[in-house]
Amino acid sequence: MLFLIVFATFATMLASGEEVVTPGKASANHRRILPKYSSPVNYDVVLAGNFGEPRPNHFHGGVDVKTGGVEGKPIFSISGGYVSMVTIGLMGFGNAVYVHHPEGYTSVYCHLKKFSPLIEAMVRKQQYQKQTAEGEFHFRPSDLPVAEGQFIAISGNTGASTAPHLHLEIHDTKSWDMLDPLDFIGHHLIDGQPPQGHALMVYPQEGEGVFAGGTIQQSIGLSSHELQRHYSAWGKVGFGIWSNDYMEATYNHYGIRRMELYVDDQQVFSSDVSGIPVRQNMQVNAWGDYDHYLRSHVWYMKAFVEPGVSLPILKTDDSRGYVCFNEEREYHLCFVLTDFKGNVSRYSFTVDGKRVEIPRKPLFQTKHVLRHDQLNNVFLPGMQLLVRPQMMGKNTSYRPKVMHQPQGYSDAYQLSEKSFQLFDYQPISLRVNNNKVEDTSKLYVVCYWGSDKYMGGTYHDGWVTGRARELGAVYELAYDDQPPTVQFLGLATLRGQKVVRFSVSDSKSGLLSYSGTIDGEFVLFEPVAKSSTVECRLRHSSVKPTGGLRTLTFTAEDNRHNKKTVTTKITY
């Protein structure tokens, strides 16, 4: 069975400023001049987060500009161009404005509370044309041109934001690669603080290397910039480092822009977190030590590259960054950490090459192995999972678990005892246990991982196909023939405006859409941030007040196309 995921991409454009290497290009033959852009705010820029910080399942795709812990700060376009798109309720961005710049970049302003009046008017026009409050709203170059420094929005806390701030991204318009906004607006920041290393992690390669007499990974605290203790090693060993960057203006810590590992003054590894292809975002779990992060919430970033990792920001020698201790002598290693402003820290240590016998690598104790470089077909009774090549950093063993559920819609399945995230969603098919299902279109795949997650579902010949990415989760089939829950909250006057509100939710397959009409004429309902409430501000609708009794109809639909319609009377 085939499962397709369509990625949205955008389209195209260049300027003057600072010369940097284009992300993903190693040679000086591929250089681009980056422009210097204005600040998005009218006060000193202070960051809550920087670009490329490692996070579970993704790199931080932009910079988080502080707004003083409050909403309502004016946001300005960092350069001239035009508003190419506005999104509402997508990708955790909440309300977001996309500005297309003629140099070939697109700046994205996220978690906004409101748009400028002109942008809001153009968005509302499209919302009524499409009869939806949420989604993508595209504009032509002549619709919403903007100048550098032009007011475009008010900061907020919408979407997946946990506190008020501005999340600013910059993308290459043609490729949609994520770029470091500090390459464009970094001259507005003050930063004289160098990065700090906290500890090393050592990874002797199983069956190929030994470190300090052991074959398991081990950590070394960085008590100083030059460790006095000597360590012993033999064979193939990888190294990683836990480190953070800092700035004077705030207590926050940040990711490291550039990391290098030298062995006897020869560079064996470097990373420059300047640009990341969106399709490779999940590879953060394989560059970072994901298993250790799950235990400690601390990221060790590896100074070696596993075979399934293709991030263009990582460069190594022919040994992929692994150090081969094959001579009985001293090896002098040094990590060099550099932030965007060029502040540098160095951490040096010495490893003595000492010949020892390396224990043989044990054979996999299970026949269940996912291979990073080939198509994997995982078959269990009543389940099939297809995993494409390049979906993990390295070959991985797994232990499948089947939980029989004769009374359920399917058996339940778990492929890993711990969290293991593939680099992208893959098709999973589950066999239906109950042949007497009344309506097969109501079946879907549910994933239990922290909370229930709807993973789609297409029925064919006794099987339902959805998608899977987290192999530590439990997957099974669920059935939803119940409509969403809709409650009329009334008509009220808020800030001088007549506002109609509904509470709408769905506890099974999840809410797909909602819409409303007054006397059969469409009116726009918009989400209220951080709540299950939607509201219609009647002043913005095309329905004119008469003071009479009007018929209000509201319909909500879930992901299995169950609908709930509520009709009531209001005086307007």
Image: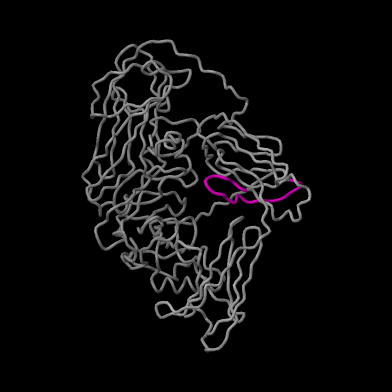
Q: Position of residue 2 (x, y in %)?
A: 67, 45
Q: Quadrant of residue 384?
A: top right
- Residue 238, relative to residue 406: is it above or below? above
Q: 389 and 566: which one is in front?
A: 566
User: Which colour assignment does the render follow?
Assistant: one colour
Which residue is located at x 26 percent, y 44 percent? 246
Could one spot residue 221 in this view of the protein? Answer: yes
Q: Position of residue 417 (x, y in %)?
A: 55, 34
569 above or below 366?
below
In the image shown, does 558 or 423 lie closer to the viewer?
558
Quadrant location, the N terminus: top right
Magenta stretch: dominant secondary structure: strand
Q: Is residue 412 magenta?
A: no
- Quarter where residue 215 is shown: top left
Query: Magenta segment, which residues?
Result: 446-462
Left of 484 or right of it: where is 460? right
Q: Residue furthest right?
A: 436
| For residue 449, side relative to residue 166 (left or right) | right
Count of number-bearing discs: 0
- Residue 461 shown in magenta: yes
Quarter-of-image position of residue 329:
top left
Q: Position of residue 540 (x, y in %)?
A: 47, 78
- Regarding residue 38, the answer to whether it shows in the image is no
The foreground one among 31 and 140 is 140
Vertical comparison of 103 with 228: above or below:
below
Q: Nearer the viewer, residue 354 or 555?
A: 555
Image spot of residue 217 (x, y percent)? 41, 25
Residue 249 lies left or right of residue 10; in this view the side is left
Residue furthest to the front in view is: 407
